[in-house]
């Protein structure tokens, strides 16, 4: 065999081997494109699309630490009814909000779970404060009573119900809100009426509620620029009694003020928690008022006073210092004097104070 034949044969063998190896080669699949989290700005700050869906999600809440003192709010270590040591409480509030556009309006959910630890009892059982679903104007689930929320909280102070309350909070409800788009809105709510109240010598006796009838709450509101007027009425089915509240708000630049009044249909049946589920004050009527005003770009002053038919009086004032965005320190001073006609809450006037550190996210 000559050299030329040997070279040709070797070349042919190499081609054959190379072809066989090429046929058996494994080709790596193209990597799937990464799906980055997309910002959803249609429903406000902090929302993002849940990957693979058209649902927008926001995870938010706050971490808070409160230090409380004084006869009114301090820790009672000797059982005399007055605070004689600092009471301290730390809280994590974890909230979730979702929103999706649908042909029937915006579909929303909202939840809030709170975890508390204090220096008296230690860790407390977590509480589910909100868990509702909303489609358009229809809302169903765990919420605060519309009697409380429709007219709003009683000012921008921490202890806005120290002397007496202005309505119930925890409830389960089905509500519908109508918004006319011109500043007028109205609401109707069917609420879980909870335990039944009976009264014996101004002391509440609680029994299991009977029947399927819920409590009924209805309200109307008109807001026009710097002014707002709202009214809400409620019927306590278990007691066949009710209550009404009305509120007027005004704002002028950074300054704002409100006045609110409440009336109960059975104010003479007073206990330490009020005359019916909705009227959480003493006697037939109660009034609240307050102002808020900026002191500097970072400091705001808030105040509130409250007084009811049974001469329960409260005055609260605070300063909120926004240290940086998302972190605020609040100092609040409270005075309460309960001088009711039935001598249930006569404390001859007590003072209390709160120092709060809160990081919101």
Image (cartoon, helix red, strand yellow):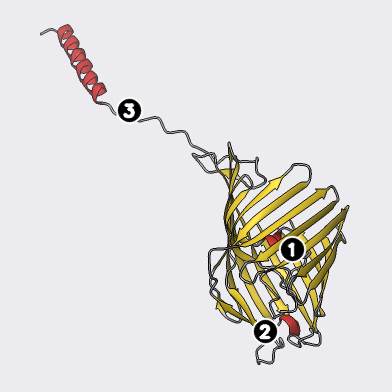
Read off the residue under disc 1: 153
Which numbered disc flags the more N-terminal residue, 2 or 1? 2
Q: Earlier in the sequence, mark 2 or mark 3?
A: 3
Residue 254 visible in the displayed image? no
Q: Mark 3 points at which residue?
A: 27
As drawn, the residue found furthest toward the right would be 252
Q: Which mark is nearer the camera, 2 or 1? A: 1
Residue 321 vertical position relative to residue 84 in the rendered view, above or below: above
Q: Which mark is residue 194?
A: none
Image quadrant holding the N terminus, namely top left
Q: Nearer the viewer, residue 13 or 113?
A: 113
Residue 20 lies, in percent from the top left, at 21, 21
Does 109 sit above or below residue 343?
above
The residue that appears at 63% across and 71% down in the rendered structure is: 90
Quadrant for the C terminus in the image: bottom right
Check residue 75 in the rendering and tell me which mark sits there, or answer none: 2
């Amino acid at each position: 065999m000559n050299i030329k034949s040997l070279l040709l044969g070797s070349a042919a063998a190499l081609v054959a081997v190379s072809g066989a190896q090429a046929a058996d080669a494994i080709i790596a699949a193209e990597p799937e494109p990464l799906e980055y989290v997309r910002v959803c700005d249609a429903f406000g700050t902090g929302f993002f699309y849940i990957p693979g869906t058209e649902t927008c999600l926001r995870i938010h809440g706050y971490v808070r630490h409160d230090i409380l003192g004084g006869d009114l709010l301090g820790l009672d270590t000797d059982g005399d009814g007055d605070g004689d040591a600092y009471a301290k409480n730390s809280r994590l509030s974890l909230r979730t909000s979702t929103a999706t556009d649908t042909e029937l309006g915006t579909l929303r959910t909202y939840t809030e779970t709170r975890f508390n630890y204090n220096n008296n009892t230690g860790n407390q059982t977590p509480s589910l404060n909100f868990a509702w679903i909303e489609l358009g104007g229809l809302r169903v689930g765990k919420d605060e009573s519309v009697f409380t929320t429709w007219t709003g909280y009683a000012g921008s102070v921490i202890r806005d119900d120290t002397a007496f309350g202005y309505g119930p909070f925890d409830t389960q409800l089905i509500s519908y809100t109508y918004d006319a788009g011109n500043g007028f809105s109205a609401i109707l709510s069917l609420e879980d009426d909870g335990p039944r109240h009976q009264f014996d010598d101004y002391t509440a006796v609680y029994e299991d509620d009977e029947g399927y009838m819920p409590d009924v709450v209805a309200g109307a509101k008109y807001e026009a620029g710097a002014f707002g007027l709202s009214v809400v009425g409620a019927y306590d089915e278990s007691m066949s009694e009710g209550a009404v509240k009305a509120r007027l708000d005004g704002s002028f630049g950074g300054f704002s003020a409100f006045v609110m009044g409440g009336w109960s249909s059975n104010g003479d049946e007073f206990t330490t928690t009020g005359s019916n589920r909705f009227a959480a004050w003493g006697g037939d009527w109660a009034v609240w008022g307050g102002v808020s005003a900026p002191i500097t770009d970072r400091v705001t002053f808030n105040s509130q006073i409250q007084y009811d038919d049974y001469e329960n009086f409260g005055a609260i004032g605070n300063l909120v210092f926004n240290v940086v965005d998302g972190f605020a320190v609040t100092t609040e001073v409270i005075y309460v004097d309960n001088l009711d006609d039935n001598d249930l809450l006569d404390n001859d006037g007590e003072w209390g104070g709160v120092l709060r550190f809160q990081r919101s996210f």
